[in-house]
Amino acid sequence: MTARKILHLDLDAFFCAVEELRDVSLRGKPFAVGGSPQGRGVVASCSYAARQYGVHSAMPMAQALRACPELVVVRGHHSGYSAVSRQVRAVFEDLTPLVEPISIDEAFLDVSDLPEPAEEIARILQRRIQDELDLPSSLGVASNKLVAKIANNIGKARHKGPTPPRAILVVPPGQEAAFLAPLPLKELWGVGPKTEEKLKRMGFRAIGDIARANEKMMTTQFGKHGRDLWRRAQGRDDRPVEYTHEVKSISQETTFSKDVADGDRLRQTLARLTENVAYRLRQQGLCAGTVRIKLRWSDFSTPTRQLTLPRPTDADGVIIQAACTLFDALWEEGRPVRLLGVGTSNLTPCSHQLSLWETPDEKERRLLAAMDELRQRYGEKVVRRGRSLDVGRNRDDTNTSK
Amino acid sequence: MKVSVSQQQLAHGLGIVSRAVSSHSTLPVLANILVATDEGRLRLSATNLELGISCWIGAQIEEEGAVTVPARIFNDLIGTMPSDMVNLALDERTQTLNVVCGTSNTDIKGIDAQEFPPMPVPNLENGIELNVADFKEMIQQVAFAASADDARPVLQGVSMTVEGSEITLAATDGFRISTRRAKLSNPVDKPMSAIIPARALNELARVAADGKQTFNMVVPDGRGQVLFHLKDVELVSQLIDGNFPDYRAIMPQSFKTTTIVSTASFLKACKQAEIIAREGNNVVRLSISAGQEGPGAVEISAQSEETGSSEVVVNATVTGTDLIVAFNVRYLRELLDVVKGASVALETNANNTPGMLRPVGNDDFKHVIMPMHLG
């Protein structure tokens, strides 16, 4: 089985980041969101500048003010946080339906079925949330939820200074145990103060000590919990990302680093985006009934067009044709385009009529199945349709997001 | 030309021939209907060069003659007239047909009958005699399985093979095959095969009156045409050139599961499932199970993201292994609509191999449907 690609994303000082959007004068200043210092208010979230003074969340506000006399105290706007959180969630879901929200500012994403390397996806996601919502975020990337979450904690902790960490820490598959080994015991899930104390008494200093311990001994000492700890210490965790809703659309878009006015180039990009979208449809066993394209002109106006297909499909060819039809109707010859996107919706579980003998449709289906297998085995870029090949051009001049 | 005919007969005749009128031809005369006196009767003909239909109606002929007039105008005009005698008179010089009925008097500009493509005259001696009612049923059971796809003209046709005293029709669109054979009252001397456009056969079934009459089919050597000679109607069609797929080789011979169900209940269940299924991909799932004790059952279920879901259970006699297989419900319904017979047998092997349906106790009609693949 190939390793999964799990992201743990958490928004850096989320409440503060939202408050900064509300009031830009707060930017860079030490401030905290929380209750009044006159009462028993505590710090719910504090800016990175405030953290320089030793302020941290859950600290009584009065104490925080003593640590940092110029600390600005902001009363929270909780309904505003939920609204922004929903916008963040929408960005996740634009990328994958496999999203497990943990709290208002934290979520797991399973991006295993996306063709790009996990690190690239993490960067795309971080950039999109920054560009579109003006929110800093940090990510941990690993083959499971446990290691992704710890990686994110460690990545953020490595960052020092008055700015948000915007960390991305990747633990490559196979490196889970090695990554965890030197970390302090309390970083491991399930290790609370009591367990930590007991472990320390047993001579354990780091997670690696648990991993090297005898499984039976751990079970005898800590019961079932001990076995879980022992497994986790090796970086093993096969819990799935628990997503709770149905897939509504699958789309991909790309922002050109320089606006593009060349029709062929745009159509080629459209074909490439569509191939990725269709690939993801097939990976999820879905067929799309509606195809949508999105253009962004240089002035940032962003028209979209969509059409309903005669029959739901997951075939590249049909979707590319529909996307090109829409594109030709929308694009004004020669007008520079900043962003191009393809989306599919009206998704249904796939079914197709089998033929008594091989038809061109079936040939296409076999071809796609072979291409999908190559992609799974060797990565997204190993195989492409002739028309979407960007011959003689550097493909890295576009920023793709999904 | 000077004739009088009954409005009803004329309207009926025009209804028969106008289906062969070519509405989009570059040849103007093909948009017209030939109106000609012919051995004491009035002949109406239309053709689009692929299909030609002629119809003869009784008429009082005062003066022989022929002309072609625009089909739509003539048809619409006659359709609005009272059921009375219609007097037709042709002004040869201007090729204008004067149509008088009751108090209405209309002149229609025509085109010279000489420009109308000649219709072949059949040599009925080489004809195959067919029973109207039987052949109509054969067409209804087969022609619907032909393809509507212009890309493969051969599949738009119905394969007809005649050998000894047996005639077989077969059609396939690549997803299903329908075959039906019948006995001929008079055996033929030499075997014959042709691909007849499904459309021509459907027109034949439409124009052939019910009843016990017989008619003749002629396939003249080397002409690439087939002629059907009925009592007052003649239909001629171009044959389709090409190789018809070897459908016999594709039809499965043995089966792991045989499911016998009442045709009426199966049809009803499919119609119900189709209400949901048509909103999606037309796919229905048949869950066939033999049942531990007592009779087995087929559960027909449909699901559509937008509309909802439906399940219908039909009692069945199931022998063999249980199976879940998905079909295009339209294919099932179209077959069950024409199957005749109180019960139908569905024979299957797997969820990705063709299933066969046929009326129980009748081997003449066989229908094969390829399943749908569920992702």
Image (spheres, coloured by chain):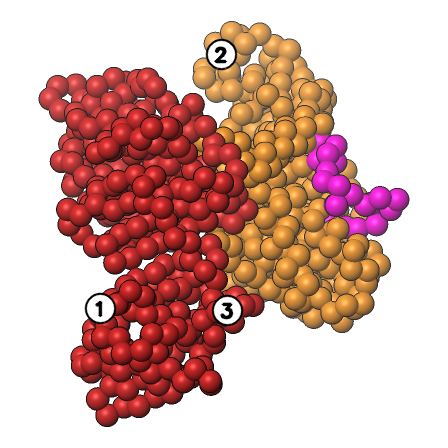
In the rendered image, the residue lying farthest to the right is A392
Circle 3: residue type: Glu
Q: Are marks 1 and 3 in contact (CB under 8 Å)?
A: no
Q: What residue does disc 2 label?
A: A219
User: How far apart in space, not on screen, are marks 3 and 2 (Cα)?
Assistant: 100 Å
Q: Nearer the viewer, residue A263 or A53?
A: A263
Residue drawn at 42 percent across, 54 percent down:
B120
Residue drawn at 40 percent across, 61 percent down:
B20
Q: Quadrant of the N terminus of chain A?
A: top right
Mark 3 secondary-structure assignment: helix
Circle 1: residue type: Gly
Mark 1 secondary-structure assignment: strand
The chain letter corresponding to orange is: A
Q: Position of residue A127 (x, y in %)?
A: 73, 51
Q: What residue does disc 3 label?
A: B115
**Is A395 situated left or right of A300 in this image?**
right
Q: What residue does disc 1 label?
A: B58
How crowded pointer 2 is (Cα within 10 Å; few <14, some 14-19, many 20+) is rated as some
User: Label 2 is found on which chain of the structure?
Assistant: A
- The region drawn magenta spans A379-402
